[in-house]
Each structure stands twice: as structure tokens, then as C-alpha cells.
Amino acid sequence: MSELALFLVRIGFVAVLWIFILSLLSVIRADLYGRRVISKIARQNAPALASGGSVAGSVASLGIEDGEVFDPTQIAMLTGRTAGTFIDIAGKRELLIGRGASCDVVISDEFASNMHSKLVLVGEDWVLQDLNSTNGTYLDGRKVTTPATIRQGATIRIGTTTFELR
């Protein structure tokens, strides 16, 4: 093999090695500090909502049939170690849910990830998003794979903990 070919193989190997190391660091950082994920729904509807669109228009754009406005002020813990407690969410626009101490809603559940999921207020609707948790987030018994709008009376399950917005 010529010196030039050997040199190019070495450079290629080092480049692949650095790409692997940087992607590994990215995954570790995401696990430690959480992902700042902006849901597709929030990105698509933010300009329309900011421009002063009506409530009915924002609700329709999110795929919800028109009805009374659901404006929850607290989270009611239904099952799990914190069953029977209420968490005030009035005035908050984003809630991080998980086992980590930095979360807004801390769940003491061995099946919950440190940064498990989050609730985001988009216009007048709350949107639930799973943050690539190990065991998943369930809305009304269905696994959340894409951001989902929460309707009145819907239950959210993370591990053995169940709660709802009221």
C-alpha cells in the first residue's frame, strides 16, 4: 500500500472515531440535562396563535372539535406513591415530569425516567410529549409516540403513577 493511501485510511479512521465520540457525548448530555424538544404542534401553531387567532381557530388547528375551553389549574395524582395530592399549575406554560429533582412534577416511581415527559401549553391547549423515556408515557391507555393534546378527563400514566389535569 502506498504512503498516501495509508495516510488517507488513517485520517478516515480518526474522523469516524471522532464522530462516534461526539455522538456518544451528545447522548450522554441529553440523558443528564434533558432534551429541549419543541413539539411539532407548538412550532406549527405558534405563529398562528401569536398573531391573535381566535380560540376556536387554535383549537380547530390542533384537531380538536370545538367545545368548551379546558383550562386546568392543577394536576391530581390518582395512583402511585403521591396519590391524593394536587400540584398547582396555574400560570405555568411548561412542566417537566420525571424522577429527577429538577423536574416540575417529581414522580417517585422506579419505572419513570429522570426526565420522562413534559406538558406544554400551546395556545389554550395542553400538549403531552414523551421525552424518549424507557417505559413510555400513556394517555388514556395509549402510548404517546408523538405530541398529543390533552382533553378534559384524560388520564396520564407514567410507570405505576396515574394523574390527570383538572
Image (cartoon, rainbow, N blue to C red):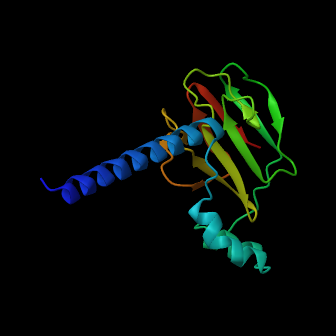
Q: Position of residue 19 (x, y in %)?
A: 41, 50
Q: Quadrant of residue 43?
A: bottom right
Q: Residue at x 36, y 48 (%)?
A: 14
Residue nearest the viewer, comparing 60 with 147? 147
Q: Quadrant of residue 112?
A: top right
Q: Residue at x 32, y 53 (%)?
A: 11
In this view, 76 is above or below 147: above
In this view, 80 is above or below 70: above
Q: Position of residue 28 (x, y in %)?
A: 54, 37
Q: Residue furthest right?
A: 91
Can the viewer see residue 118 in this picture? yes
Residue nearest the viewer, comparing 73 with 35? 35
Can the viewer see residue 64 in this picture? no
State the quadrant of the C terminus: top right
Count of numbered marks: 0
Residue nearest the viewer, comparing 102 with 82? 102
Q: Quadrant of residue 114?
A: top right
Q: Position of residue 32 (x, y in %)?
A: 62, 35
Q: Residue at x 70, y 65 (%)?
A: 67
Q: Position of residue 110 (x, y in %)?
A: 58, 20
Q: Residue at x 67, y 22 (%)?
A: 108
